[in-house]
Image (cartoon, rainbow, N blue to C red):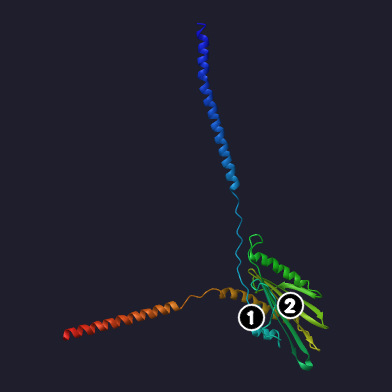
Amino acid sequence: MHRSAPRLSRILACAAVPVMLVAVGCSSDSDSDSKKNAGSSSSGTASTKPSEPTVEAARFDDLPDPCASISKKTIKDLVPEAKKKNGTAGRSNDLAARSSCSWNGLDDKGVDGSQYRWLDVGFTRFDSDQSLGSGAKRATAEYAKQVTKAKASEGAEKVAAEPAAGIGEEATVVTYGLSKTDEDFAYATVVARTGNVVVTLTYNGAGYAGAKTPSSASIVKGAQKAAKEAVAAVAETADAKVTPPAKSGSDDSTKDTAKGSSSSSDSDSRKSTTKSKAKSN
């Protein structure tokens, strides 16, 4: 009995070894799986990034010819005896982004004096940019900037500003008086925005050699009329890029149908003649 006890202890000890190994192995596998799952979860979270909102596309991608944006009739009415009836274009490195044109003239009335007029129109277009914002948003900022600039014109007197209805999406007319070359000038600047384009139009006049200074009301009326035409020219330039439907297709098909009908009738006529000859023979 004493000899068998140690032997039994050794057997029990050996039998317990595999159980411990299995336990250790299972523990290692579960730890490894947990780490893998944690890793995949964290990597999935890191790879998911919120997408940035796409800015609104710009409405206009080009500008009109500034010197053709106002009708010749309007130029004749507003700037009598203009030195250059077709206007003088301003310098620009990119006419699709910024352009301008101006007219000036002196209408000599002899002993009744002379009337001087000056008209200038400028266009500024903004593209949509992911980092800077939409073209319309950028144009709105420029619109406000130009209104402020007009109000702060050097030497301006009796400055006033009010909304101008019916010109683009938003417009402001700024009026003021200005004395220069010993004459009193009446000024009106219309700043308007249409989509992603800002139109800035300035019209002024003065009387020389004893002639009266034009009324502010007449200068404002002329400026608003020209500004409406300039804003309309922006839309017309965009519409002109739309290709009209082709009309030649229907004409060609009509011609082809007519040719086909003619060919068929000629063929039938020849067949009838051949049959008649065969019968007579």
Q: Dot 1: within a 10 Å radius of its alpha carbon, few (fewer than 14), some, or many (20 or more) residues? A: some
| Disc number for residue 105 | none
Q: Dot 2: within a 10 Å radius of its alpha carbon, few (fewer than 14), some, or many (20 or more) residues? A: many
Q: Nearer the viewer, residue 233 or 98?
A: 98
Residue shown at 54%/32% (left/top)? 29
Q: Is residue 125 above or below residue 255?
A: above
The percent coordinates of residue 80 (x first, y second) are 71, 87
Residue shown at 77%/80% (left/top)? 186
In this picture, residue 45 sits left or right of residue 279:
right
Q: Residue 131's image quarter?
A: bottom right
Q: Is residue 227 above or below residue 31?
A: below
Q: Residue 38's image quarter?
A: top right
Q: Secondary structure at mark 1?
A: helix
Q: Nearer the viewer, residue 276 or 144?
A: 276
Q: Which residue is mark 1?
A: 68
Q: Secondary structure at mark 2?
A: strand
The percent coordinates of residue 184 (x first, y second) are 80, 82
N-term-proximal mark, 1 vs 2: 1
The percent coordinates of residue 274 (x first, y second) are 22, 83
